Image (cartoon, rainbow, N blue to C red):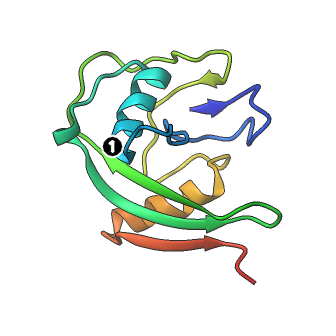
């Protein structure tokens, strides 16, 4: 997904993602964000946590990103938030677009190598 009009990483490629709401688990959030952003419904049992990334950028608070994978969903993926997303497309994880968000570009190769956890960013 190419981010647009958000004020954060606009023009960069990302994945369906977002922040936790107060009353939801990370699984709930992954399911909600997939439905809101690309219009697909996923059952909790069809999600597998494939990576956790502890990241921090200079001048920002540290974050923890959870990466989930699924091979089953209902619906046809589409750009359901055109006011926040310029376009969507399928990308080869072995050849990510050059404009991929830095922490995602960091995590994807590690996911492909089977690494469940990584640290990324400005920790000095």
Residue drawn at the location 43% of the way across and 45% of the way down = 92
- Residue at x-position 43% and y-position 55%: 66
Label 1: state its secondary structure.
helix
Residue 72 position by quadrant: top left
Look at the picture and state if 86 lies above or below 108: above
Q: Is residue 32 above or below residue 113?
A: above
Q: Is residue 94 visible?
A: no
Please name the residue shown 26% across and 41% down the image.
70
Which quadrant holds the C terminus? bottom right
- Image coordinates of residue 96 in percent, x first then y, are 53, 50
Up-down relation of residue 35 to residue 72 (above or below):
above
User: Residue 33: x percent and y percent?
Assistant: 45, 31
- State the residue position of label 1: 27
Q: Residue furthest bottom?
A: 124
Residue at (58% x, 17% y) in the render? 81
**Most extreme residue toward the left, as rendered?**
45
Q: Position of residue 113 (x, y in %)?
A: 34, 70
Residue 61 lies left or right of residue 26; in this view the side is right
Decide: is 119 above or below 81: below
Horizontal and vertical percent position of residue 34? 41, 29
Assign the N terminus to one quadrant of the image: top right
């Amino acid at each position: 997904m190419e981010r647009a009009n958000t004020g954060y990483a606009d023009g960069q490629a990302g994945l369906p993602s977002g922040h936790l709401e107060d009353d939801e688990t990370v699984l709930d959030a992954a399911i909600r964000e997939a439905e809101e952003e690309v219009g697909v419904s996923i059952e909790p049992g069809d999600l597998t946590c494939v990576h956790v990334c502890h990241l921090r950028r200079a001048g920002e608070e540290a974050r923890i990103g959870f990466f989930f994978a699924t091979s089953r969903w209902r619906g046809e993926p589409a750009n359901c938030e055109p006011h926040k997303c310029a376009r969507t497309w399928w990308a080869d994880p072995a050849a990510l677009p050059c404009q991929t968000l830095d922490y995602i570009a960091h995590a994807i190769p590690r996911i492909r190598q089977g690494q469940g956890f990584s640290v990324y960013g400005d920790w000095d």
